[in-house]
Amino acid sequence: MAKLNIIYFSSTGNTEQIATFIEEGAKAAGAEVEMIAVDAANESSVDADFVAFGSPATGSEEVAQEVIDYIESVKDKLAGKRVGLFGSNDWGEGDFMSMWIQELDKEDISVVGEGCIVNLAPDDDEKIEKCKEYGKAIVS
């Protein structure tokens, strides 16, 4: 069975909620899933068939520093892997996601699709379904 580890940072709980719906989608597609808060993640946390990283947009559309630092510490293990990216934003257009994808692309880390961005919380059927579908896409 393929394994997906979801490593995330969530300050308000929105990104953690997105992670749980991505987990549901991946499990529905037959994957084993483990959710890990970034401050509990270590080098072996990326030892899975698939990895997804979650971060809210912070500051002026930036990925949380905790997530950036963690990815930097394990990037050698990520080269050649398919990685999912997700997060919540508030006021911006989601520029943090496209910049994040470009940064990982430079490191030879391929991101599934355009990532998954939810404005604020995944609090309606459309947003929830989007998260679940992304979970399936990561492990497919």
Image (cartoon, helix red, strand yellow):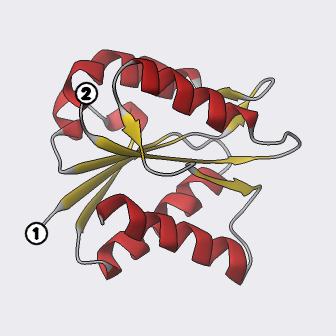
Q: Amino acid at mark 1?
A: Met
Residue 24 image offset from top left, x and y in percent: 41, 75
Quadrant for the N terminus, please. bottom left
Residue 57 image offset from top left, x and y in percent: 70, 36
For image coordinates 20% across by 26% down, the residue present is: 77
Q: Is residue 4 left or right of residue 94?
A: left
**What is the crowding at mark 1: few (fewer than 14 residues within 10 Å), some, or many (at least 20)?**
few
Determine the image quadrant of residue 23: bottom left
User: Label 2 vs label 1: CA separation?
Assistant: 22 Å
Residue 61 image offset from top left, x and y in percent: 76, 29
Q: Is residue 19 left or right of residue 88?
A: left
SS at mark 1 in the image: loop
The one nearer the camera, 33 or 13, is 33
For image coordinates 57% across by 48% down, the residue present is: 114
Q: Amino acid at mark 2?
A: Ala
Direction left: furthest residue: 1
SS at mark 2 in the image: loop
Up the image or down, 54 lies above or below 4; here it is: above
**Disc number for residue 77:** none
For image coordinates 22% across by 39% down, the residue present is: 45
Determine the image quadrant of residue 94: top right
Up the image or down, 94 lies above or below 133; here it is: above
Q: Is residue 89 left or right of residue 15?
A: right
Determine the image quadrant of residue 130: bottom right
On the image, numbered disc 1 is attached to which residue?
1
**What is the crowding at mark 2: few (fewer than 14 residues within 10 Å), some, or many (at least 20)?**
some
Residue 8 image offset from top left, x and y in percent: 46, 43
On the image, numbered disc 2 is attached to which residue?
79
Q: Which-is-in-front pick, marks 2 and 1?
A: 2
User: Which callout, 2 or 1, points at the residue further toward the start of the chain?
Assistant: 1
For image coordinates 33% across by 81% down, the residue present is: 28
